[in-house]
Image (tube, grey):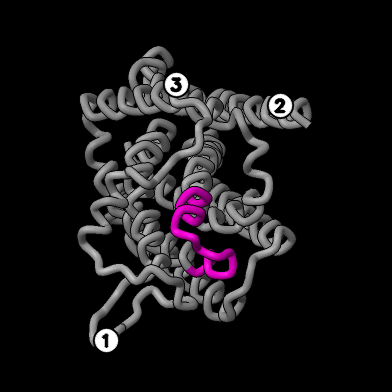
Amino acid sequence: MVYFPWSEYWYFYLIFSGFILALLALDLGVFHRTAHEVSIKESARWTVVWISLSLIFNYLFYIYGQDKFGASEPGLPKQLALEYLTGFVIEKTLAIDNIFIFAVVFSYFGIPRIYQHRVLFWGILGALLFRGGFIALGSVLMQYKAAVIFFGGLLILTGLKMFFAGTETQNLENNFLVKQMRKVFRIHPEIEGQKFFVRKNGLLFVTPLFLSLVFIELTDIIFAIDSVPAIFSITKEPLIVFTSNIFAILGLRSLYFMLAHVMDQFAYIKYGLAAVLVFVGAKMVHLNELFGGHFPVTWSLLIIASLIGSSILFSILHAKRKT
């Protein structure tokens, strides 16, 4: 049973999307109108803002649930609020992998820090649109048990692959996507300010900023194949999947700038992410069935937090030992 069907809550999606677009317009048009290098202090402040907005929304969502379902199903509002919070934590956790990709891409294409925010802004905007499509498709596919098992198995395989891949730095020189982009686009080798396109001798060229943006968009689509089904393992409500996903992605830029200076200290974070993917995949394939169709949300939240927290702790201890 879906408590927030599209036919009854379509207006909410429109209002919510308009609100998010307004926030993004305020971000780029006011706070980052002039290109500048984002400091750790500024990125930390924005990280707090985005997480606070997400938690405020969760509280308002809980209040609405109390008003809507509190009398008929007293425990449902708390359950739905926990599903949102767990979905947000899962997406935020899996987004850490995107952050490492950002660092590799910007390093490979030689994007100065002063222009990285602009690339990530349009990258995040594109990701929001693509995620909406994936969630709409997922809400249909996840009604079929075969699809649930397929995506669960895919998450397990992805987690195992990530685990055995270790922590080696990625090299984009021989990457398939990079090779294809070089075949498709006429590339201008130099950075031309904030421009994605430049015209030289009557010909239109793309700059390294545009190439980095395309690569980030394509890799996010690949990551969405993992992250969207992962949240559907927690809840069957597309509205919860959509809102938790969007709020988690919104804070991705500020989180990247905050962690960029200390990223080399998180040597074991990959293993924590891999363990989360395996756990979520196992939920979809078998664990949910063991618990009457729904693995306890509080257990999921604690397990995911423990896996990521442990990997961060081991990373910090490893960095101190090396020092």
Q: Is residue 16 left or right of residue 45?
A: left
Q: Quadrant of the N terminus?
A: top left
Task: Give the residues drawn in magenta, as a range.
Answer: 102-118
Disc 1 residue type? Asn
Q: Nearer the viewer, residue 63 or 104?
A: 104
Residue at the spot 27% in from the left edge and 58% down from the top edge? 182
Q: Is residue 293 magenta?
A: no
Among numbered discs 1 and 3, the one appearing first in the sequence: 3
Among numbered discs 1 and 2, the one appearing first in the sequence: 1
Disc 3 residue type? Phe
Which secondary structure, mark 2?
A: helix
Residue that label 3 marks:
164
Query: Which quadrant of the view contains residue 204?
Result: bottom left
Position of residue 152 measured from the top left corner of the image (x, y, whole percent): 33, 25
Among numbered discs 2 and 3, the one appearing first in the sequence: 3
Gap between marks 1 and 2 measured at Cα: 53 Å
- Tell me the tag on residue 318: 2
The majority secondary structure of the magenta stretch comes to helix
Which secondary structure, mark 1?
A: loop
Residue that label 1 marks:
201
